[in-house]
């Protein structure tokens, strides 16, 4: 029910310089008005929009804190409703007591994401822009943040709305021609429609293709470290993380399972996975570890193949090289502090991949590895300044369904089907694109999306 007034902490419940309590709804101004007075104890008028007032906030007759009151009247607020923010001192107890006072005065505690949900329901933002708010909050690197901000500013919405406008125009023309053939002729329109649909389909496919880049932005480049036992995989993970996360010993087979860490290398997010050493073994537990290592490799965006340069290549190395396939891979000649018996040229020839010489133990060569990863994923492929990137799996699904519908339109045109066949699939594409913006989505889906937000957003 949007008839009630909600409140929540808009800042974290931790000690800080400033704490913010947000109140939104039809009674926001009147509720907060009952709690604030001037320094001399008189009433304070907070009704004027977009003004900040200095006041003291009271609980009954007890002054609680010295505050600033920011009022934003509907519709010129984040939620599109009357909204009041109370800026108080950032003590945990103080914020809790002021929030309790607001609840006692007539507001209720907001549900997770309810402020942004109300912004969507009140038409302030569409659903794709609302989801971008959540992405901004959870962004873990600069590029992910930039992509989310662009989406919040409407980069996805504008493109989707453009496609929908063209689809609707074409569908309306066909419907008009079918209803009034004496005055509106459809002769020759099929070729024009084919051009329009092909152009839109090309754009949608480009957005779908960008989703993998969007996933890497959001979750990090899924990076799996492969190598035979004692090659230095765990030492490499520790060097990259900057902490002893993996156990390192001279005993082959120490790592029995995958170990996952999220790290940020100069703005590049990696979800990095250390794996069991790959070799033939009769040990049941180690064999499971090898199977999991190979499974992790099959799902990776990037493989880092660690080679012990102080010992000759063997059957285990040949097996690993066979697993590389056509995936992105960097080969590391580890233990550069020891006498090498393998050359970079030999490894490059065998793997067909770039080879870097490092020492994970002494943490040398890490800068070269970081720069190579960045070059592979962020300089050659991703163009964040001028490219709309899909970072949401729901959007990708809707785009895929819209693409299928438009492909059916082209198929119907190729089969010289009647024009009313075109309209069915055109409107299906129109509706699928509309789901991205939040049109005709179910209440359950809306609730699910906003339940993932933090309480004060």
Image (spheres, helix red, strand yellow):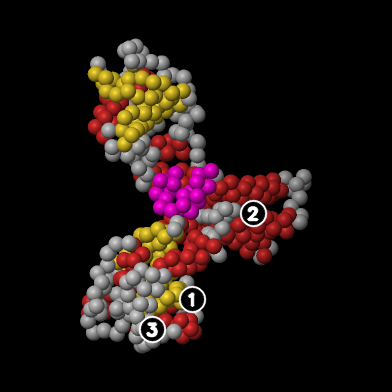
- Apparent side of residue 383 relative to residue 355 in the rendered image (left or right): right
The numbered mark at residue 420 is: 2
Q: Which residue is mark 1?
A: 354
Between circles 1 and 3, the one closer to the viewer is 3
What distance separates the C-alpha of mark 2 from that of mark 3?
Answer: 72 Å
- Which residue does the image show at 39% across and 39% down from the upper left? 457
Between circles 2 and 3, the one closer to the viewer is 3
In the image, the segment drawn in magenta is 133-153
Q: Position of residue 99 (x, y in %)?
A: 29, 29
Q: Which residue is mark 3?
A: 340
Counting residues from the start of the chain, the first of labels 1 and 3 encountered is 3
Asked whether 272 or 186 is in front, the reply is 272
Q: Position of residue 352 (x, y in %)?
A: 49, 80
Q: Hey, which quadrant is residue 298 in on the image?
A: bottom left
- Apparent side of residue 236 relative to residue 50 in the rendered image (left or right): left
- CB atoms at circles 2 and 3 under 8 Å apart? no
């Amino acid at each position: 029910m949007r008839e009630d007034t909600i409140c929540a902490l808009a800042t974290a419940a931790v000690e800080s310089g400033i704490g913010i309590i947000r109140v939104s709804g039809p009674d926001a101004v009147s509720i907060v008005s009952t709690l604030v007075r001037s320094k001399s104890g008189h009433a304070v008028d907070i009704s004027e929009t977009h003004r900040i007032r200095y006041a003291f906030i009271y609980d009954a007759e007890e002054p609680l804190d010295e505050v600033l009151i920011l009022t934003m009247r509907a519709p010129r607020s984040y939620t599109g409703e009357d909204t009041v923010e109370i800026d108080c001192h950032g003590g945990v107890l103080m914020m809790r007591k002021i929030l309790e006072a607001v609840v006692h005065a007539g507001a209720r505690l907001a549900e997770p994401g309810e402020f942004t949900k109300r912004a969507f329901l009140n038409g302030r933002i569409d659903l794709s822009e609302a989801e971008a708010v959540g992405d901004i909050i959870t962004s873990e690197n600069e590029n992910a943040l930039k992509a989310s901000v662009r989406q919040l500013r409407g980069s996805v919405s504008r493109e989707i709305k453009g496609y929908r406008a063209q689809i609707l125009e074409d569908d309306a023309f066909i419907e008009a021609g079918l209803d009034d053939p004496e005055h509106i002729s459809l002769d020759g329109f099929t070729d024009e429609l084919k051009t329009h649909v092909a152009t839109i389909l090309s754009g949608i496919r480009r957005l779908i293709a960008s989703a993998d880049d969007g996933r890497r932005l959001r979750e990090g480049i899924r990076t799996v470290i492969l190598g035979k036992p004692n090659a230095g995989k765990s030492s490499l993970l520790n060097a990259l993380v900057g902490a002893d996360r993996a156990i390192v010993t001279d005993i082959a087979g120490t790592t029995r399972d995958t170990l996952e860490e999220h790290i940020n290398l100069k703005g590049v997010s990696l979800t990095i996975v250390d794996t069991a050493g790959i070799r033939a073994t009769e040990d049941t537990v180690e064999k499971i570890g090898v199977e999991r290592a190979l499974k992790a490799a099959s799902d990776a965006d990037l493989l880092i193949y660690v080679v012990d340069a102080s010992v000759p290549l063997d059957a285990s190395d040949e097996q690993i090289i066979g697993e590389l396939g056509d995936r992105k891979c960097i080969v590391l000649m580890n233990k550069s502090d020891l006498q090498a018996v393998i050359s970079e040229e030999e490894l490059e020839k065998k793997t067909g991949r770039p080879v870097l010489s490092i020492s994970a133990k002494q943490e040398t060569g890490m800068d070269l590895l970081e720069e190579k990863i960045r070059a592979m994923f962020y300089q050659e492929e991703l163009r964040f300044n001028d490219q709309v990137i899909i970072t949401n799996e729901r959007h990708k699904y809707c785009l895929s369904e819209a693409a299928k519908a438009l492909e059916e339109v082209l198929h119907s045109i190729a089969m010289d089907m009647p024009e009313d066949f075109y309209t069915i699939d055109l409107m299906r594409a129109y509706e699928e694109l509309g789901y991205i913006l939040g049109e005709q989505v179910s209440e359950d889906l809306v609730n699910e999306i906003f339940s993932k937000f933090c309480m004060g957003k």
